[in-house]
Image (cartoon, rainbow, N blue to C red):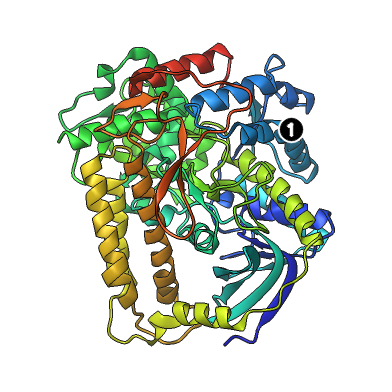
Amino acid sequence: MAQNIIDTDVLVVGGGGAGFRAAIGAREEGAKVLLLSKGPLARCGASPMAGADYTLDGRSLKELGHNGDPNDTPEKVFKDIVTQGFFLNNQRLVEQYVRAAPACCRELIDWGITIGFSEERAIFTSGIGIMDALARKAKSLGVVMRDDTMVLDLCVRDGAITGGLGLDIRTGEFIHFRCRAAVMATGGWHKAFWPNTGMRDLSGEGMAAAHRAGADLGNLEFITFSCNVIYEPPIWRGSIAPYVLGLLAGHRLTNSLGEAFLDAYDPYIVKVGSGTEWNKSFISQACMKEVRAGRGFPGGSIHFSRGDIPWEQVEMWASLIFPRWKYKAVDLSEWGRMLKENLPLKVGPAVEYFDGGIVVNERFETALAGLYAAGECTLGAFGSNRVFSAITEMLVQGAAAGRNAAEYAAGTAMSAADAKVFCALEEEAAAPLSRRDGVRPAQVRRKVQEMAHAHLGPIRSGDELLSFIGFLEEIEKDTLPRLAVSSPYRAYNKEWIDAIELGNMVHLLHASALSALFRRESRGVHYREDYPDTDNDHWLQESIVSSGGLEVSARPVTVTILAPPGGKLPYLEMMKKMMEAHSETGGHH
């Protein structure tokens, strides 16, 4: 039984942008705040690796003194987010996103970020620059921070959050956290898929713990895959460099027959779906159709080259975004040589962003009293397709969640520690350490990841989802209870951490696959081969996985301003309709 007990008013779980901004928001309201980071402070999760574009309406950007479009308005941005989300957005959260974005942008500038350049609706900086600015601000306010600390589960009494069980990764010792309120800001669960574009510490334990404790999960079927992610060679696998360069300079995609397969699609969809972030859904699905039809390369890839794009144009853009052919500390100079000689690279879709997550209201409250959530781990503003910035999302939501959590904490007494609950949670978490004969996590994890990529990818079918659900049920029943680690030593025991993470990843994959099976239509980044229409008459509903199990039910989408259209259209026709609605506003992202 751990003797280490730490009390705080607001416990913030997650060391990325949403977590730091929530900690700042709570501290500004006078709360005692403890921020827990699974890895190094301000250097773990997705935030430091972001590009990073911060989006807001052009008029507000212009008023901030940057290159914004003066004819743009918050109302136009609202419409674009909702139409591009295929009308599945919670419009209250979209209003909050649009309304709060300018003030959060001004804060970042005041806190010292460096702006590389700006365009009609965005400023571009770096993820590390944002995290450094947030860390400086949090430190100046007296936020207490702990790195290398995981939260394994939450503790609840009478339907309210009371604390959580933590693990000090450096020592292997358990920690009992007691709090009046908590903010979950743990990002996505990229590690459940292989390949993926995310950091390897993003395994979804925050979302899974919140669900077990009493929060609901929603829209988990909507998973954004980035297109044009490197599959081979293995040293570059998971890099989105071709996606970034192709979006700016252009590119050519061919199948194993040498066909430029995008030529078979509507030219308007190809133009918009190649030159904007619509490509994440359109090109990912188009590539997977080739692979599923047997026209891909081994490993499920297709070929990326510059085609007819002049080398000088490619080289110019590459020099701006990949100085000396380095991207995120990876040397891509050999790829530069391949591009110059117009040699193909093997690419394909890989998980990049999760549109669904913990269900919150406009105050970022969950169904569990005292538990708030912010950022990518939430069912946020973007509906079924995100085309605007997750950087803006994490900051505006983090700020609001932190402030509201502090307000709740101010009126709530600290509950006494429940020793029996903590003891039971500790025993469950430590079980793999005491098993000598069992299954090693690494043996199971890669199979789970590859099955997730194959069956829960950009294109799904009912039969494949049922097969995957059966596989996951077998893992839950027969494998997870037998997970064992080779060393009983607790300090920096990576295999033990892997075992804990694996259970959370399987839980979320199961909930996601059930949600994808439940939604019998195609919408946004969810494409059902056996239900290829977007059906606004029957499926303008969120899929909710309530706490206490994995039953999926429907909940009407929240509409405040923009009424969704009715009707049922083939998926690509609906996509074209949404693209045209976006272009009518003069939107850019």
Q: Which image quadrant for residue 155?
A: bottom right
Residue 254 or 511: which is nearer the viewer? 511
Residue at coordinates 15% horizontally, 36% vertically from top-left? 294
Residue at coordinates 55% horizontally, 11% vertically from top-left? 584
Residue bearing mark 1: 102
Q: In the rendered view, tell whether residue 320 sits above or below residue 209.
A: above
Q: In the image, 446: left or right of 425?
A: left
Q: How many marks?
A: 1
Q: In the image, 328: left or right of 279?
A: right
Give the image location of residue 296, x and y in percent: 19, 36
Residue at coordinates 72% horizontally, 43% vertically from top-left? 113
Give the image location of residue 491, x and y in percent: 51, 82
Q: Mark 1: which amino acid?
A: Pro
Disc 1 crowd rating (10 Å Cα; few below 14, some 14-19, many 20+) is many
Q: Is residue 136 visible?
A: no
Query: Which element is circle 1 on?
Result: helix
Q: In the image, 198: left or right of 259?
A: right
